[in-house]
Amino acid sequence: MAIGAICNREVVITDRKTDVPEAARLMRQYHVGTLVVVEDVEGQRRPVGIVTDRDIAIEVVAAGIDPASLTVGDIMGGDLATVRETEGVFDTIRYMRSRGVRRVPVVDNGGWLVGIVTLDDLLELLAEEINEMASLISRGRQREAATRT
């Protein structure tokens, strides 16, 4: 299954110039812990970074820095991991593990943002798959019992 089939296509975005308090307000408003930082290029959005609630808590608040003095561009990570929407689920999991990330923006072949996938999304998918396999075992037992009576 391609990751594009399961990624969340409703991505909360911002740009590098957004100040940290506004980023936190966006996270609160949309009930998310991650903002994808994008560059707008002729109406299309290219992901250039990610800012998480943890970035704000650890890098700004815990460090005693005035949040209003920083922008998203100041605290976002510099080496963004992305995955193409045509990548398989297993390859995406392996890539996320190798990069040590819990979320990745999903891009099309041109590198434009189409969605985001998180560890939570992948765990939910795998839990559903395991549940289906467990049901198969139960159904097989029921079928066998019905044919032997």
Image (cartoon, rainbow, N blue to C red):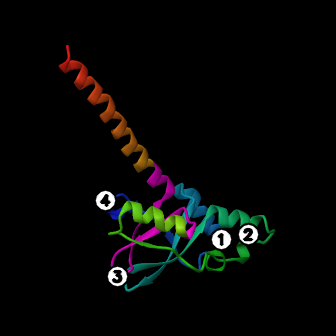
Q: Tell me the element at label 3.
A: loop
- Please tell me which residue lies in front, 66 or 127: 127
Mark sitting earlier along the chain (2/3):
2
> Residue 116 at x, y = what percent?
44, 64
User: In this picture, is 128 found above or below 110?
Assistant: above
Other residues around mark 3 within 10 Å, as few (<14) / some (14–19) / many (≥20): few
Amino acid at the residue labelled 4: Met
Name the residue that disc number 1 marks.
20
Query: Nearer the observer, disc 4 or disc 1?
Result: 4
Location of residue 46 in the rendering, given as x and y in whole percent from the top left corner: 43, 79
For disc 3, the marked residue is 110
Cα distance between the residues tagged 4 and 1: 37 Å
Up the image or down, 66 lies above or below 41; here it is: above
Q: How far is disc 1 from disc 2 in space, using C-alphas?
A: 9 Å
Q: Which residue is mark 2?
A: 60
Give SS at disc 1: helix
User: Nearer the viewer's eye, disc 2 or disc 4?
Assistant: 4
Mark 1 belongs to which amino acid? Val
| Tags 1 and 2 touching, CB below 8 Å | yes
Q: Secondary structure at mark 2?
A: helix
Between 88 and 76, the one nearer to me in the picture: 88
Which residue is pictured at 51% across the width and 63% down the height?
A: 103
Residue 117 highlighted magenta (yes or no)? yes
Q: Mark yes or no: residue 12 visible.
A: no
Q: CA distance from mark 3 to mark 1?
A: 29 Å
When the figure is inspected, residue 110 is found, relative to residue 25, above or below; the finding is below
Instruction: Check disc 4: other Cα within 10 Å, few if <14, some if 14-19, many if 20+.
Output: few
Q: Quadrant of residue 7?
A: bottom left
Magenta stretch, residue numbers: 99-123
